[in-house]
Structures are given as C-alpha cells and as structure tokens.
Image: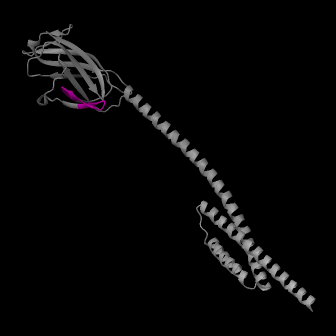
Amino acid sequence: MNYQKKEKTEEQEEIIRVKNSELENQIKVYEALKADFERQSQELQAMGLENDSLEAKIAAINTDLNQLRGFRKSSYSLADQRRFRDRASAFEKQLKEKDAEIAKLKEDNEVLYTENTGLKVTQNRLSDSLTTMKTTNLDLSEKVKVASRLEAQNINVNIINQRGKEKEDSDSEYRAKRVDKIRVVFKLGKNDVATKEPKTIYMRLIEPDGAALYNLSMGSGTFEIDGDDMYYTAKRDFVFDNTQQQLSFLYDKNAEYKKGQHTIELYADGFMIGKANFVLK
C-alpha cells in the first residue's frame, strides 16, 4: 500500500511538472507573438501607416498572457491547453500573412521611391534646362538690345549769334560772348535690328566745369541710365523709321556761355549714342 501510494504521488507530481512545463512554454510562445506583432506595428509606422487590427491583436495577446500567468497559481487544464494552443496557431497564421503584406508594401514603396527619385532627377534636369534657356534668352535679349542701339552720326554743333545768323566752324571754336543759341545737328545710322517705333533722344550739354546745363523752364529734366538718374539739358521725341533720318536740337541758355571746351552727349534707349565737343573762346 505504501508503494502504491508513493507511485501515485510521483505520478501526480509528474503530471504537475508536465503541466507547468506546458504552461511556461505557452507563455513564451505568447511573449514571442506579442514581440512580433509589435515589430510589425513599428514597421508600418516607419512607412507612415497605421493598423488598428494589429493594435487589437497585441491587446488580445496581452489579455491571454495575463490569463496564462494566472494559471501559475491555479489549475491549467487540458482544455485550457488546447484552447491557448489553438489561439496561438491562429495568431501565428495571422502573423505570417501580415509579414507577407508588409514585405509587399516595402517592395511597392521601394518601387515608388525609385520612380520618385527618377522623377526628381528629370525635374531637376528640366529645371536646369529652363534656367539655361532663361539665361540664354536673357543673353540674347541683351545682345539684341545692344545690337538695336541707335547711333548718332555726323554730329555738328552750329552757333547762332544774337543777329540770328547761324555759323558752323570747322575748327569747332567760337567766341562765347557772341553765342545766343546752339543747334546740334546729326543723323541716325541705319539699324535693321532696331524696332521702328516712337523713341526719345536726350541731349546733355556739359560745360567746361563738368556740369550739365539744367533749366526746367527750358525743358530740362532727368532720365534713368544704368539704374541711376541723370540730368539732361533737352530732349525730343520722334518715330524711328530706319531711314537715316536727320534730327536736331536748338538750345537757348538765356545767359552768357562760359569759355572753354563744351561736350554734347546724346542718349537713347539707355545708351549713349553719340558725343561731340566744341570750344568757346
């Protein structure tokens, strides 16, 4: 009887040992499942995706883990073992399916990344091409602007004395006290690039001290050249027709002229188009 009792006790201890071993193994299985589902959740978040079903699975596994750990202080029946094994198998199947889904998403993202990189390269090339074209167009525009610059040719300065007599001196020297008015005569050179349109020519009459004659009452003013304002002595509007037309300025200082070298400067479209000197004695 003692032998049978001892044998029964050992059999019960073996059953308890097997159940405890089965319980601890099952707990490890669920802990591994939880870690894998959390990994999947992190991978989806890294791709900017959220998956509520994964969070629900992690919550369910936590509940199962709490129940399994509770069996350490209570009986862990064969029915419980089968139930948790079946649930673990279902979780493992879902885990594999989700891994395959994530792998496909990563592959698709890699393809999209490659395509986006290609598009960015193409876009950068187009942007570079547009920049080059804009630079080229600016260069061409600047070249056309320079090429279309007018040219004042054969600039002559004639003196009109107080009697109204006009005199042209080949030596460009006149007596200052006899000067009443100054006439500047010139013709425009032929230019097939310049647009036939209304234009304005500005004249600057610069005295020996370097200052341009400026009198608002006589039609003087300012114009812009190279971004700066510049005083002009007189201006005239005309229509350029590319016929080498002749133009002139008649200026009355309404005061005695200074002795020394004077300079005539002519400007149009932001360029100096002609320059001449004359001397008053």
- Name the side, left or right, on which 178 lies relative to 233: left
Question: Residue at left 60%, top 63%?
Answer: 45
As drawn, the residue found furthest toward the top would be 171
Residue 165: image quadrant is top left
Can you say whether 179 is above or below 100 in the image?
above
Q: Position of residue 90 (x, y in %)?
A: 74, 75
Question: Residue at left 81%, top 82%?
Answer: 16
Q: Nearer the viewer, residue 85 or 190?
A: 85
272 falls in the magenta region: no
As drawn, the residue found furthest toward the front would be 2
Can you say whether 134 is above or below 205 in the image?
below
Question: Residue at left 46%, top 35%?
Answer: 135
Q: Position of residue 204 (x, y in %)?
A: 21, 23
- Name the side, left or right, on which 217 lies relative to 267: left
Q: Position of residue 22 (x, y in %)?
A: 79, 77
226 falls in the magenta region: yes
Residue 69: image quadrant is bottom right
Q: Nearer the viewer, residue 133 or 83?
A: 83
- Name the side, left or right, on which 100 lies relative to 121: right
Q: Position of residue 145 (x, y in %)?
A: 37, 29
Stretch of the chain drawn in magenta: 223-236
Q: Nearer the viewer, residue 195 or 151?
A: 151
Can you say whether 256 is above or below 10 in the image?
above
Q: Mostly what secondary structure, the magenta segment?
A: strand
